[in-house]
Image (cartoon, rainbow, N blue to C red):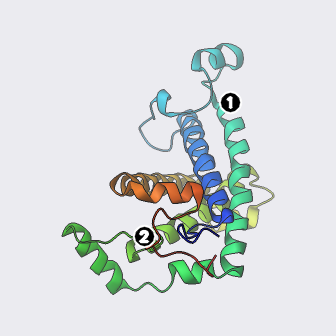
Amino acid sequence: MDTRKPLLHPGVIRFTHWMWALGIILLLMSGLRIYNAEPLFDFYFPIWLTLGGSVESANALHNDFGTAGALLWHFAAMWLLLIALPVFLVYGVAKGHFRAKYWPVTPREVIGDITDFFKGRLAHDIGVRNAVQKVLYAFAVLDMIVMVASGLVLWKPVQFHTLGLLMGQYEGARYVHFFGMAGMAGFIVVHLALVLLVPKVLLPMITGRAPQPSLKSDAGVP
C-alpha cells in the first residue's frame, strides 16, 4: 500500500456507489416519463428531463409518448440497483463498514452539526462522516430499499400481492414509489451540493485513495 495515500474507499464501496449513481439517474429520468403517461398529480415533467426516446417517433410508431422506451430503460436500470444493493448491504455488515462509518449517531450530534453548518464551522474531513452525513446516507439506503420493494409491487402486483398489502396494493405502491423517487432526488441535490462545496471528496471515490497522508483512512476498516 502507498502509505502516502491511505485507502479511504475499498473497491466494493466505489463499485456499488457508481452503480447506484448510474442506476438511480436512469431510473429517475425514465420514471418521470412513465409518470407523465399516467400522472398522480396535476402536473407533468418536462420532456427534456425524461428518458424514453423521441416523443415524435414513439407517437408515430407506438401511439404513445415514449412510455414503452422508458419502461425498457427502467427495467434495465433496475438490475443495477438489484445487484449493487445486496452487495453493499452484505459487505457493510460482514466487514463492519456500517458500524465503523455510520454508527453511532445521536440527535444531539445531528443538531450540533446543523448548527455548525449554518455558522460556517462544520468540518468536512475526507474519510470522516459527520452526523448529518450519516443520517443522509442511512436515509438513502432505506429509501432505495423502499423503492425496490414498491417497484416490485408495480412490476408484478399478483406475485408480490402480500408485499402490496403493506402499501395499499398497486395504487398505493405508485404513491410510495413516487415519494421515494422524490426523496432520492432530494438526496441527490444535497449530495451534489456537498460535493461542489467540498470538491476534494470526489477524487477518493474514484481512486479510493486520500490525497494527503494526514487524512483519516479506512486502514483495517473496509
Nearer the N terminus, badge 1 or badge 2?
A: 1
Crowding near the residue tagged with mark 1, few <14, some 14–19, many ≥20 C-alpha atoms within 10 Å: some
Q: Which residue is mark 1?
A: 69
Q: Nearer the viewer, mark 1 or mark 2?
A: 2
Q: Quadrant of the N terminus?
A: bottom right
Work out how far the residue at label 1 is from the one at label 2, CA to CA, in angstroms: 36 Å
Q: Amino acid at mark 1?
A: Gly
Q: Give the residue at the far right of this rendering.
A: 159
Which residue is located at x 45 percent, y 72 percent?
Answer: 215
Which residue is located at x 28 percent, y 71 percent?
Answer: 122
Residue 27 locus on image (x, y percent): 60, 45
Up the image or down, 193 lies above or below 11; here it is above
Which residue is located at x 50 percent, y 68 percent?
Answer: 137
Up the image or down, 18 lies above or below 12; here it is above
For the residue pair 59 and 99, the one nearer the viewer reads as: 99
Q: Which residue is mark 2?
A: 133
Residue 144 locus on image (x, y percent): 59, 61
Residue 16 locus on image (x, y percent): 65, 59
> Quick one: SS at disc 2?
helix
> Quick one: SS at disc 1?
helix
**Residue 25 figure quarter:** top right
Q: Amino acid at mark 2?
A: Gln
Q: Give the residue at the far top of this rendering.
A: 60
For the residue pair 149 and 85, the one nearer the viewer reads as: 85
- Residue 4 shows in this picture: yes
Which residue is located at x 41 percent, y 57 percent?
Answer: 200
Q: Quadrant of the C terminus?
A: bottom right
Give the number of the disc on residue 59.
Answer: none
